[in-house]
Amino acid sequence: DGIVTGINCTIHDCTASGNGDGGIAPGNYSIVKDCTANNNNGYDGIDVVNNCTVKDCIASGNYASGIGVYGNNCQIDGNTCSGNGAYGFWVYHDNAGNSITRNSAPGNSPGGYGNTSGNNDFAPVQTPSTATSPWANF
């Protein structure tokens, strides 16, 4: 991994690019803000676990998903994930209490948003020109 932290950390304005594994992997209760995770060759651009926030980040061209959510009660807001080998955003647990809002996920291999069955944590996925929700994902 490019940037790996323990719990209760803030990763701000950092870049993780071209790593042999994932890009950014903070511990529980951490914040990732204004970061870039591009072209990481082993896994997701950004992986979060429990009670994390990922805001205003870019994760593009990664081997797997742009942002992978492996835990509960995370806030994923205002990010752009494009051109990844898997989904732009992928939530691995169902009914986990995550909030996935105001993100953009164009041009990812299987689609923009991957979601475990039964997970209702995503804001609606809409197109920008016809969006009716201020929280919509695109």
Image (spheres, rainbow, N blue to C red):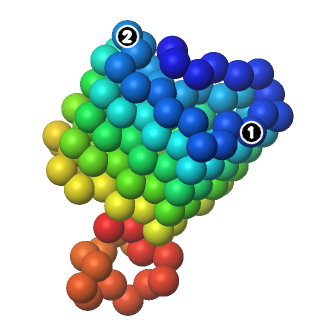
In front: 99, or 29? 29
Name the spot of residue 16 as percent of width and height, x first.
Answer: 47, 27
Tell me which corner region of the image, top left, top right, bottom left or bottom right, holds residue 52. Answer: top right
As drawn, is 65 to the left or to the right of 133? left
Name the spot of residue 32 as percent of width and height, x first.
Answer: 63, 43
Quadrant location of the C terminus in the rendered image:
bottom left
Name the spot of residue 135 as percent of width and height, x first.
Answer: 49, 76
Q: Which element is circle 2 on?
A: loop
Tell me which corner region of the image, top left, top right, bottom left or bottom right, holds residue 133. Answer: bottom left
Q: What is the spatial separation of the Cα atoms under label 2 and label 1, in whole angstroms? A: 23 Å
Where 42 sits versus 134, above or below? above
Q: Is residue 76 visible?
A: no
Circle 1 crowding by C-alpha within 10 Å: few under 14, some 14–19, many from 20: some
Q: Which element is circle 1 on?
A: strand
Q: Earlier in the sequence, mark 2 or mark 1?
A: 1
As drawn, is 69 to the left or to the right of 106? right
In front: 86, or 72? 86
Residue at x 76%, y 22% (from the top left corner): 6
Residue at x 78%, y 34% (from the top left corner): 9
Residue at x 22%, y 32% (from the top left corner): 85
The amino acid on which the numbered mark 2 sits, given as a three-letter code, is Gly
The label number, if any, that marks residue 44 in the structure image = none
Where 128 sits versus 132, above or below? above
Q: Which residue is mark 2?
A: 20
In front: 68, or 91? 68
Q: Which residue is mark 1?
A: 10
Residue at x 53%, y 43% (from the top left corner): 35
Name the spot of residue 28 as percent of width and height, x first.
Answer: 74, 32
The amino acid on which the numbered mark 1 sits, given as a three-letter code, is Thr
